[in-house]
Amino acid sequence: MFKTKKSLLNPNMTDTLIGEGTTFEGRIKSEASIRIEGGITGDIECAGDVIIGERGLVKSNISARDVVLAGNVQGNVTTKGKLTITSTGSLQGNINAASFIIEEGGLFQGNSKMDTKSVSAAPLHTNEQENGGMPASNQNGAFKGNTVAM
């Protein structure tokens, strides 16, 4: 009689919108992206992106792939990717993100922790080991400075 349609949600699509003038209290868990233009009190757990509009007012801890903040958030934000605070955005809380961008005029009050991939030092080449760890170009005095691997 009724067929259930099971399709995978695309985390790149905005599936949920909390519109301006709407207030929501409770926990939200979503596989797709969320856009908030209204008010939310409660934790947000999202496999996609969370976008807080300019008039958005959020009092919660947010966990998402990427977060764009143009409104006001009071709570901690954890992202697997990038947190962007626009020129109209403000965040009072701690962040844990791989990448953090704050535009001029944006406000951030709290502590930040950035998870990065560990960078290993480049091994010395054979000719550098023979010269006491100095680059080969230093033998003839052509290079006088520090070598930095990026």
Image (cartoon, rainbow, N blue to C red):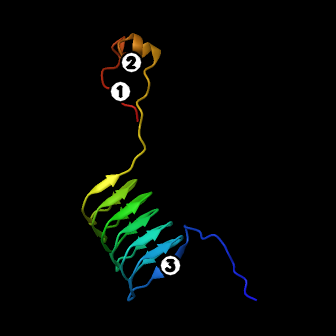
Q: Residue at x 39, y 86 (%)?
A: 20
What amino acid is found at the position of numbered circle 2 in the picture?
A: Pro
Judge by depth and name the residue closer to the eye, 47 or 88. 47
Q: Nearer the viewer, mark 1 or mark 3?
A: 3
Disc 2 marks which residue?
A: 135
Disc 1 marks which residue?
A: 147
Badge 2 marks a residue whose secondary structure is: loop
Would you say the residues marked 1 and 2 are in contact, meaning their CB atoms lie under 8 Å apart?
yes
Q: Residue at x 69, y 78 (%)?
A: 5
Q: Position of residue 13 (x, y in %)?
A: 55, 71
* Gap in angstroms between the C-alphas marked 3 and 2: 57 Å
Which mark identifies residue 16? 3
Q: Is residue 61 above or below residue 20?
A: above
Q: Earlier in the sequence, mark 3 or mark 2?
A: 3
Q: Is residue 110 above or below residue 137?
A: below
Badge 1 marks a residue whose secondary structure is: loop
Q: Position of residue 86 (x, y in %)?
A: 34, 67
* Gap in angstroms between the C-alphas marked 1 and 3: 50 Å
